[in-house]
Every structure is written in C-alpha cells, then in structure tokens.
Image (spheres, rainbow, N blue to C red):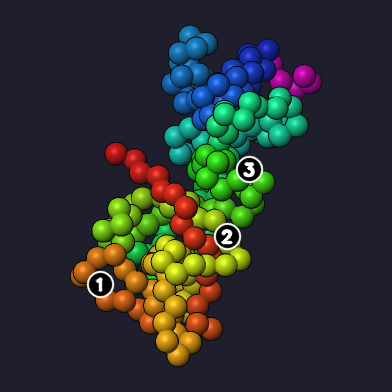
Amino acid sequence: MIGITEKQQAILNFIEKFMEGSGMAPSVYEIAESFDIKPPTVFAHLRALQRKNMLTRTSQARSISLNRRQKTRKKRPMHMSFMLSIPLLGRINAGLPADSMEYKEGEVLCDAKIIGEQNADKAFALKVHGESMRDMGILADDIVIVKQVENVNSGDVVVALVDNATTIKSFYPADNGMVELRPANDEFEPQFYPAEQIHIQGTVVALQRVF
C-alpha cells in the first residue's frame, strides 16, 4: 500500500486480526509485545497511521479504531462481538444539572450488541460527576453509554437537557403535564419540571468503569 511501510502494514493487520478475534482493540503494550518492540516505537507507528488516516485513537485504553475496517472486514459469525467507537462528549452532573455537553473529549469503545451496529451514529458516551444515582450503581467518574431514542418509558434512566444543562436521572411522567427526574440517592430530592422544558437526549444503556 502506497505511503505505508511494511511494519505499519503488519501492525494494521495485527490490530484488525486482534479485533476480529477478541472484539476489542489491542493495547499499545500488546502490540509492542507481539512485534518485540518498545511502546514508544508503537506510539510512533500509530501516530504515523493516524496522519495517513488509516486509524483513529484517543488517550483512552484500547481506543484504536481502523478507518479502513468498514470496507475490508469480512462478514463475522453472528456470535462474535464487535466494538464500536462512539464520541465521549464530556462530563454530566448526576446531582444538579451541569453545563451543556456539546464538547467532545474523545472516544470510547462500546459493544455493538448494546446499541446495534447500525445505530452507531445515535450513541454517545458521557462522564458522570456526582453521586445522585449512586444506589443504581452509577458512580462519579463512570462513563455512561447513551442511546438516542424516539420514545422514553417510565423508569428509564435518561440524559435530560434542562435549561441548556444536562443531568442524569430516572424519568417518570407526573400529573398536570409535569415530569419527575428522580435520583437514586436519598440525599437528593426529586426534580419536577414542565414536560416542555425538558429535552431527552437519550437513555442510558450501559456504563463503563475503570478500577
């Protein structure tokens, strides 16, 4: 392939094979070990491949995504997992509504089975700040995977836009055209808003946590 060295092509092939076999991208250290080279050398190759638009990656672990994969990958057996790269749009507040989330901080990998491979453009990730959803297991600094939906059901955990700020709560329709955004922590009070003041940006379908 023009513009790509033999070693870079070999690394691309290794990444693709690794992703097909494990359903996730390899780490820099796994690439280094496979080719018996040092991690800084791997970083240099990856940066070169990024400049040549062959892959994208962020500072997140296992965040490599092959740009050519959509065109060249073979049909996978139905039982195999496939990881999608979705945008990480910033922090949200799990207590009171926080600032607008329209800022992309990077990308995260998400199992395609969670959102559907055809719905990759309808999914995004957000970092949680606060403890109001603690009793549902959603903790500060967790990354929640959010899927944009047309309809929201009572009890869904949603990302809601209120007064140009975002919050994560359980959604419950209330009386008189009101909506309750309910926390999962007794230290926080439920929030009630007129339905027309709330824009549901999506429902939380999964979370990721780094220990």
Is 159 situated above or below 45? below
Q: Report the predominant secondary structure element of the magenta stretch.
A: loop
Quadrant in which residue 96 is drawn: bottom left
Start and end of the magenta stretch? Answer: 1-5
- Residue 113 visible to the viewer: yes
Quarter holding the C terminus is top left
Q: Earlier in the sequence, mark 3 or mark 1?
A: 3
- What is the x, y in percent for residue 95? 32, 68
Of residues 134 and 31, the one drawn nearer to the viewer in this rendering: 134
CB atoms of marks 3 and 2 within 8 Å? no
- Would residue 164 be seen by someone viewing this image from the given angle? no
Give the residue displayed 52% in from the left and 39% down from the top.
111
Identify the residue position indicated by label 1 in the image. 188
Q: CA distance from mark 3 to mark 1?
A: 36 Å
| Viewer-nearest of discs 3 and 1 | 3
Crowd class of label 1 (few under 14; some 14 to 19; many from 20; radius 10 Å):
some
Q: Percent from the top left, x then y, of residue 9? A: 67, 17
Mark 2 lies on a secondary structure that is loop
Does the magenta-highlighted stretch encompass residue 3? yes
Please check the rendered image and state whether residue 11 is part of the magenta-colored stretch, yes or no: no
Q: Which mark is residue 148?
A: 2
The kind of secondary structure element at disc 3 is helix
For marks 1 and 2 on the same chain, the one whose residue lies earlier in the sequence: 2
Mark 3 crowd level (few <14, some 14–19, many ≥20, 10 Å Cα) = some
Could you give the CA–CA distance between mark 1 and mark 2, rounded to whole angstroms? 26 Å
Q: Which residue is mark 3?
A: 117
